[in-house]
Amino acid sequence: MFDWLQNFADWLIYGLAGIEKGSHLGDALNFFVYDTLKILILLFVITLLMGIVNAYFPVERIRSFLSRNKLFGLEYLFASVFGAVTPFCSCSSVPLFIGFVKGGIPLGVTFAFLVTSPLVNEVAVAVLLGSFGLKTTAIYVATGITLGVLSGIILNALKLEYLLTDWVKKIWENAEAEREAFEIENKTFFQRIPDIAKEAFGIVKSVFPYVLVGIAIGAAMHGYIPEGFFENYIGKQTWYAVPLAVILGVPMYANATGIVPVIQVFVSKGIPIGTSLAFMMAVVGLSIPEALLLKKVMTAKLIAIFFGVVTICIIISGYFFNWIL
């Protein structure tokens, strides 16, 4: 599908620039050019498609639907799927979390959204698709949505509403009086396309620096780190590799755009794909900045429980990835 991009990168680096093929610098620059162009193209196309989805299923409509309908357990799946089609990182998901709470949606359902939103979105899908292919991307998306559903159900069963801050409890008390009906702007599909394309371009533009930085780091690792460098530490035969990768990833913070090119190199250098994806999920799904933002709505104990449950689910997902991929 992208052979023409590889040919262009080969021509640009090995032909026009005259850098020796197989050299550290040549391999690094070739990786950088090819991956940058491929990811940007995929990112725009998938963001455009997801923009069309979001245009017909906006936040206000979904929030209203979830708060007014009894779905017999399916609300966790709906919230998780909605999280998957919204382009938010862990920190920018928090304001929507507050909006869900304000809309009267049960806490467990809101958690399902909060878990899935940073893990699975059009940015993550585009970058994963370009780096690992359709099969791995599809399994990652399905696992991310399942992770959100299971985390939401577990956290809801624990009955943790009493650990929300007084600020949230006051919002809940006044939520019914503050809700307003959302009026959908009456536009035809073709009238919406220019705005959707503009928004897609804006998303690509906003993440472009992260694309460059992430791929630059990945390119440097690809060109200069020898094969099998990581295998001695977190190889497949090491039982603690997945938990260690997740624990190391939780304190870090990056979005999928910046971390996936690095994960791609991890895999090429010998780290099992499940371990690598578990590390990625920990980095993009849980972070210290997110915890600080959540302090507005959760007590420290609730944040610790939330992080603990999601961390355990990610570790299980890592073992699952290693088993099937």
Image (tube, rainbow, N blue to C red):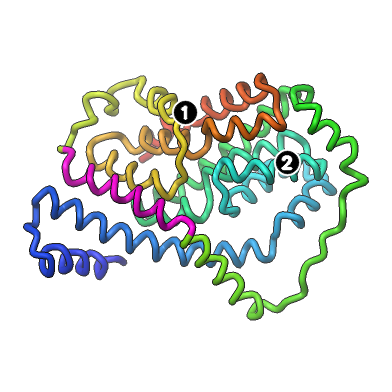
Q: Quadrant of residue 272?
A: top left
Q: Secondary structure under badge 2?
A: helix
- Res. 190 image quadrant: bottom right
Which stretch is magenta? 206-225
Image-based side of 243 in relation to 145, left or right: left
Q: Residue at x 6, y 57 (%)?
A: 20
- The image position of residue 2, as x and y in percent, is 29, 66
Residue behind mark 1: 251
Quadrant in which the C terminus appears: top left
Magenta span dominant secondary structure:
helix
Q: Residue at x 63, y 40 (%)?
A: 114
Which of 304/18 is in front?
Answer: 18
The amino acid on which the numbered mark 2 sits, given as a three-letter code, is Ile
**50 lies left or right of 153:** left
Within 10 angstroms of label 2, few (less than 14), some, or many (20 or more) residues? some
**SS type, badge 1:** loop
Q: Residues within 10 Å of mark 1 (few under 14, many from 20)?
A: few
When the figure is inspected, residue 220 is found, relative to residue 309, above or below; the finding is: below
Number of numbered discs: 2
Instruction: Read off the residue under disc 2.
Output: 98
Give coordinates of residue 275: x percent, y percent. Answer: 37, 32
